[in-house]
Amino acid sequence: MKLTLKIWRQENASAKGAMQTYPIDGVEGDMSFLEMLDVLNEQLINKGDDPVVFDHDCREGICGSCSLQINGEPHGPDRLVTTCQLHMRMFNDGDTIVIEPFRAKAFPVIKDLMVDRSAFDRIQHAGGYISVNTSGNTIDANAIPVNKEDADDAFAAATCIGCGACVAACKNASAMLFTSAKVSQYALLPQGRVEATTRVLNMVEQMDKEGFGNCTNTGACEVECPKGISLENIARLNREYLSASIKG
Amino acid sequence: MGMISSSIARKVAMALSGLFLVFFLGQHFTINLTSVVAPDTFNSWSHFMGTNGLVQGVLQPILIFGVVFHFVMGFILEIKNRNARAVKYASYKGGANASWASRNMIISGLVILAFLGLHFYDFWIPEMIHKYVESHPEDPTRYYAETVHKFESPVRVGLYVISFVLLAIHLWHGFASSFQSVGFNNKYSTALTKFAKVYAIAIPLGFIFIAVYLHLNQIPH
């Protein structure tokens, strides 16, 4: 199929970027979106042009590296998939596809479509862990009984791959769904309760410091999340935060 | 004050002030409805609300504070949220993943704020002048006729109807979403959300009915 791609090109973080148009031919429906961009880049390299820079790693939907705002939606028009798992059969011959980086003040563009998502890492560093002695005498996690429903909810929250689609989709560029998933996966388990108070306070403080917007419950994040992280996590985050604030 | 500086605290503050205003709307609607079914009751309740020391001296300032807090915080959040995305998308499909009502609370909110200006001009300011600036003999039966005459103008009724439609849109997202903001999400949430959605439509629709009813049932001057 033949497509017209409108892609954001930006030389570096401080350069002024602009949309550029690229016609592309020979795209197969079975290609992933990233494979389609590989084809484009081969064409650009053969012409001596600078290839389009974009994030990618595992290409099997689990690493959270790929991003891209495709036709106004993070990870494109399909649901519960990352860009690497989005297939070109979702598009039609002759379509124009607008491809932009995830936009947020907290996700500055590094080059073209690649953005710096280290703000997520810093939120994780602020409390997204449990302090366990790993010097050789670690207690088996299964030795502590956990309610099945809690275990399932914790697991569901832990499937967040930190791709940033929630931020990209949110009209406020809020990171509340990401932070809530990271808080929830520990808050639901006995091992995580020990540091629950400081965890939620520190992670929310870091989230605010990074310059993300405020959550206004539009629910766009849940719809666009490739892992289907539920808004229930945000309600839990709010509860955890309020209770931690009272406890001090 | 440290707590109000966090994004979650601001969100909870918006939710709680919003819930307070939703409760007030229900009370306001109940009294207004008596103007349709029992004008004498409307007169006596209005007289009570307008002359009771607790209502005038304590509840009214709390209400005004609640309204001012809600829209000032709304503006602050809107500015902060716009700043969180300095470079806008060339293509942004907001309708693909969120309702118009949820994405445009600032627009419905601004219309409601403009309506409040008109509403204060229509009722609150004349009432304050009547009570505290000019001296009139006490007349507990004046409220019904004054209210009915306010709705004589079709332009005013039209503006009220438009404002109530925007109020319904504002409540459609705001009321149900306030439970999520305070962390309430459990087995009762579905029922509570349904109640909030029904309330969001029924109360503004009721206000529209009252405005139109009073317009169509004018009493001679």
Image (spheres, grey):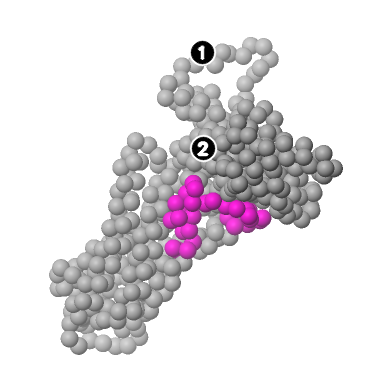
Residue B146 to residue B30: above or below: below
Magenta range is B81-109
Residue at x-position 54% and y-position 23%: A191
User: Does the rendering let one see residue A135?
Assistant: yes
- Of residues B103 and B53, the one nearer the viewer is B103
> Callout 2: residue from which chain?
A
Taking the magenta stretch, the answer to whether it contains residue B199 is no
Amino acid type, residue under disc 1 in the picture: Ala
Contact between labelled residues 1 and 2, with CB atoms less than 8 Å apart: no
Give percent across and percent down for residue A171.
55, 52
The quarter of the image holding the C terminus of chain A is top right
Residue B205 to residue B147: above or below: above
Q: CA distance from mark 2 to mark 1?
A: 37 Å
Give percent across and percent down for residue B81.
58, 55
Instruction: Classify residue B142 as left or right of residue A44.
Output: left
Amino acid type, residue under disc 2 in the picture: Arg
Label 1, on which residue? A143
Label 2, on which residue? A79
Q: Secondary structure at mark 2?
A: loop
